[in-house]
Amino acid sequence: MFRRNYSSALLEEAVDQLASLPGVGRRTALRLALHLLDEPRENVEQFAGSLVRLRNDIRRCPVCGMISDDGVCPVCNDTRRDAATVCVVESLRDVLSIENTGQYNGLYHILGGIISPIDGIGPGDLNIQPLCDRLAQGRITEVVMALSTSMEGETTAYYLYKQISRFPVKVSAIARGVGFGDDLEYTDELTLGRSITNRQPFKP
């Protein structure tokens, strides 16, 4: 049953789906739906197909957890990068933010979240053991903590520090150019770049 201000239940369904995306309100969703309605059929089919392929065919890098089209990701495969330095982040969005600064040339490790008891996320839900497995190989000499400066991010960083302190690696953290409570993906590139470059020893 469609709403009174829509002439089509199919339009309403499309608006509902578009409005479910982060940062997309119903007004914007309606504009997008109407735009797609005016597009040639083949363009819309190509658009929809790319989203389906994104969801069904993309893989996770078995080394760092980043997305990849096939197997190990381009960052892990890049022999020009500093393989002795690993930057630990919460999500793929943080990797993209750091890469955009152009100030970091090491590898990454994506945790897949941060410890948040209120959300039911504990250490066992994160990719912590694979990080320890990488460190156990002995090729990594520095771990850079690049987690959000929220209470949950600080808790996660402290827990990680306790887990990796048994390995002979330097543990550092991004400088406090990133304000307390800030998410990396919303930090401007200049500030984030300086925070990476001026990283400091991690102090639990």
Image (cartoon, grey):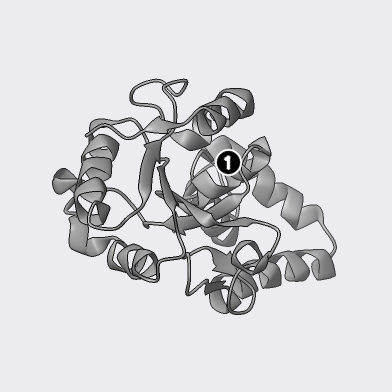
Question: Which of 135 and 96 lies nearest the eye of the viewer?
Answer: 135
Q: Is residue 22 left or right of residue 98?
A: left
x and y, in percent, of residue 186 in the image: 51, 31
Q: Report if residue 152 is visible in the image.
A: yes
Question: Which of 61 and 136 lies nearest the eye of the viewer?
Answer: 136
- Image vertical order of residue 136 relative to residue 141, above or below: below
x and y, in percent, of residue 4 in the image: 50, 44
The image quarter containing residue 201 is top left
Question: Which of 136 and 36 lies nearest the eye of the viewer?
Answer: 136
Q: How many marks?
A: 1
**Residue name at image x 20 percent, y 57 percent:** 123
**Residue name at image x 56 percent, y 31 percent:** 197
- Image vertical order of residue 24 relative to residue 74, above or below: above
**Residue name at image x 36 percent, y 52 percent:** 169
* Three-letter code for the amino acid on which mark 1 is drawn: Ile
Asked which secondary structure carries label 1, the reply is helix
- Image vertical order of residue 190 relative to residue 123, above or below: above
x and y, in percent, of residue 27 in the image: 57, 36
**Among all residues in the image, which is located at the extreme front?**
168
Label 1: how many residues lie within 10 Å, few (<14), some (14-19) or many (20+)?
A: many
Q: Which residue is mark 1?
A: 98
Q: Is residue 192 left or right of residue 78?
A: left
Which quadrant is the C terminus positioned in?
Answer: top left
**Residue name at image x 57 percent, y 51 percent:** 106
Q: Report if residue 17 is visible in the image.
A: no
The image quarter containing residue 1 is bottom left
x and y, in percent, of residue 157 in the image: 28, 42
